[in-house]
């Protein structure tokens, strides 16, 4: 807890030196988002540039994470953290809001720099203002909204993201996201013929969206690999560009072998839990 408080103090000091927060000051004073009132920084200033991604994600996201964009991802801890790790490794500040189960240890294991990480377990009903303030000092914010935002709130949060030139990674659905990452297939390795230890997990990640991501791409990744990090599965054919609609991407990606379930075999997940794999993955 002490480390987290130190990180918060450091970030707020940096914000104060740069410029005061517009729209009302401290986070604790922020009220629920009003349809009539603008969010801090609610204007669009175009800016070029991208945030880097880990080498494991470069085939899926060859252009990195476009500044000012919103990226949606499946609610899977390691995939979410892997998206933020490249930015953190480059020396940027990152924030995680609305994911109380993710701690500093899990983030560090995934490659994030704990010294440049802000954790807000419960952003509360005023989460749009919290996100706006975080984007004022962080290049990337990983967010799980506590509730489904209205279209108007969503547009204003997107405008704030563009205004600050950051990247908002949303865990779950977000209608205005430029791209979305989902896990179509996953399987653990190490069990062998019914016995052994869980050592790594392969996952087929599918990226689809708008613009450069209009054609879905899929690639097998280790999430996590034997060393606990994200990596491309050796011998993989590389990121696959799928020329059909998203439904074809799911069909090609397939489901859990051998039962064909789209989100993974329940029996396999039960076995993995009984073998004691870490819940943070």
Image: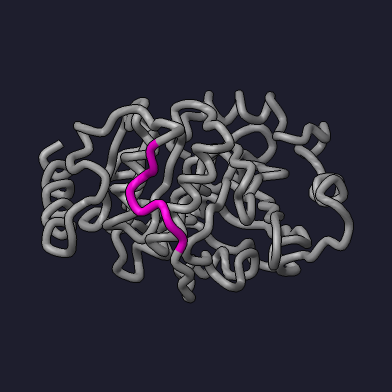
- Quadrant of the rendered image containing residue 111: bottom left
Query: Dominant secondary structure of the magenta stretch?
Result: loop
Residue in the picture at 29% in, 47% down = 133
Residue 255, image x and y in percent?
Answer: 78, 39
Query: 247 or 221: which is nearer to us?
Result: 247
Q: Is 260 positioned to the left or the right of 196 in the image?
A: right
Residue extent of the magenta highlight: 37-44
Q: Is 240 positioned to the left or the right of 156 in the image?
A: right
Q: Is 190 positioned to the left or the right of 114 in the image?
A: right
- Quadrant of the rendered image containing residue 194: top right
Q: Does the segment drawn in magenta span residue 254? A: no
Residue in the picture at 66% in, 45% down = 183
Residue 10, image x and y in percent?
Answer: 13, 54
Examine the rendering and report whether any part of residue 197 can be seen. Answer: no
Q: Is residue 280 above or below residue 85?
A: above
Q: Residue furthest bottom?
A: 48
Residue 233, image x and y in percent?
Answer: 63, 61
Residue in the picture at 39% in, 32% down = 33
Q: Is residue 43 above or below residue 2?
A: below
Q: Is residue 146 above or below residue 154?
A: above
- Quadrant of the rendered image containing residue 217: bottom right
């Amino acid at each position: 807890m002490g480390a987290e408080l130190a990180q918060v103090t450091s970030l707020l000091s940096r914000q104060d030196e740069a410029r005061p927060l517009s729209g009302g000051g401290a986070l604790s004073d922020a009220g629920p988002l009003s349809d009539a009132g603008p969010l801090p920084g609610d204007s669009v200033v175009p800016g070029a540039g991208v945030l880097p991604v880990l080498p494991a994600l470069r085939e899926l996201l060859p252009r990195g994470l476009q500044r000012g964009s919103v990226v949606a991802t499946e609610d899977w801890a390691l995939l979410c953290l892997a998206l933020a790790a490249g930015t953190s490794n480059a020396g940027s500040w990152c924030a995680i809001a609305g994911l109380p189960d993710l701690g500093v240890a899990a983030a560090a294991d995934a490659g994030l720099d704990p010294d440049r990480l802000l954790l807000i377990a419960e952003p509360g009903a005023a989460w749009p203002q919290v996100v706006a303030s975080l984007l004022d000092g962080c290049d990337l914010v990983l967010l799980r909204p506590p509730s489904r935002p209205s279209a108007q709130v969503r547009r204003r949060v997107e405008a704030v993201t563009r205004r600050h030139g950051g990247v908002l990674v949303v865990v779950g659905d977000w209608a205005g996201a430029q791209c979305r990452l989902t896990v179509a297939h996953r399987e653990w390795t190490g069990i062998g013929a019914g016995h052994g230890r869980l050592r790594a997990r392969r996952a087929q990640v599918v990226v689809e969206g708008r613009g450069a991501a209009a054609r879905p791409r899929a690639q097998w990744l280790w999430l996590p690999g034997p060393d606990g990090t994200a990596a491309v599965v050796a011998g993989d054919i590389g990121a696959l560009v799928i020329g059909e609609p998203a439904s074809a991407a799911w069909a090609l990606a397939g489901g859990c072998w051998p039962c064909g379930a789209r989100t993974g075999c329940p029996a396999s997940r039960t076995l993995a839990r009984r073998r004691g794999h870490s819940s943070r993955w």
